[in-house]
Image: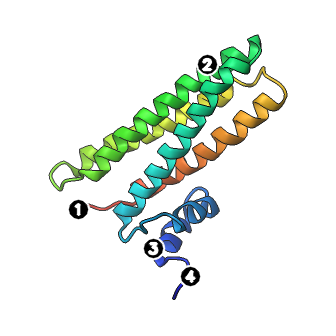
Amino acid sequence: MAGSLPELVRSSCQHATFPQVCVHTLSVYNPPANTPRELALAAIKVSISRASKVSDYLSGMQKEANKREKGAVKDCATQISDSVDNLKKTLGEIKELKRGTFRWQMSNAETWVSAALTNEDTCLDGFKEVAGTVRSDVKKKVTNVAKVTSNALYLINRLDHP
């Protein structure tokens, strides 16, 4: 039925860490995913896209930040850039899943996405001593990235042997 939520997205996202975010980001993904692997790949791509936008935002913000903010923004930019790198490695690994190396590849992917989540968390830790709109803006953007990254990890963990 036109306009209805794709069944794969609904059933896959219902137990995700952030189910509403999962449904919202993946139900509009184009082209629509037809398999759990395609859905996991879409989730990783969404995470890469959002993390890249936050990385660009932080790079621009470094020029405007005061001294206290600048250190936190610079550290956060490095953490988010590292997250993007880890997510890109994950994307490549999930694209190339093979029967004989499936467990090893899944372990790599899970490790890299977990590292991306840790980087996102570490980024936010750096803003504990920063007040005002910079802190709230960065927290909002990075938290959004962490939510889609967490959902990507959930969908990766659900994959079966090819």
Q: Amino acid at mark 4?
A: Ser
What residue is drawn where x is 60% and y is 64%? 24
Which numbered mark, 2 or 3, is in the foreground of this view?
A: 2
Q: Which mark is residue 126?
A: none
User: What's the CA distance linking mark 2 and mark 3?
Assistant: 39 Å
Count residues near mark 2 (Cα–Cα under 10 Å), then give few for <14, some for 14-19, many for 20+. Answer: some
Farthest-out residue, top:
67
> Mark 3 — residue?
8
* Residue 161 x/y as whole percent: 25, 60
What residue is drawn where x is 58% and y is 25%? 77
Q: Which of pointers 1 and 4 lies earlier in the amino acid sequence?
A: 4
Which numbered mark, 1 or 3, is in the foreground of this view?
A: 3
> Mark 1 — residue?
162
What residue is drawn where x is 34% and y is 61%? 37
* Residue 130 x/y as whole percent: 78, 22
Q: Which mark is residue 74?
A: 2
Q: Does 51 sit above or below residue 71? A: below
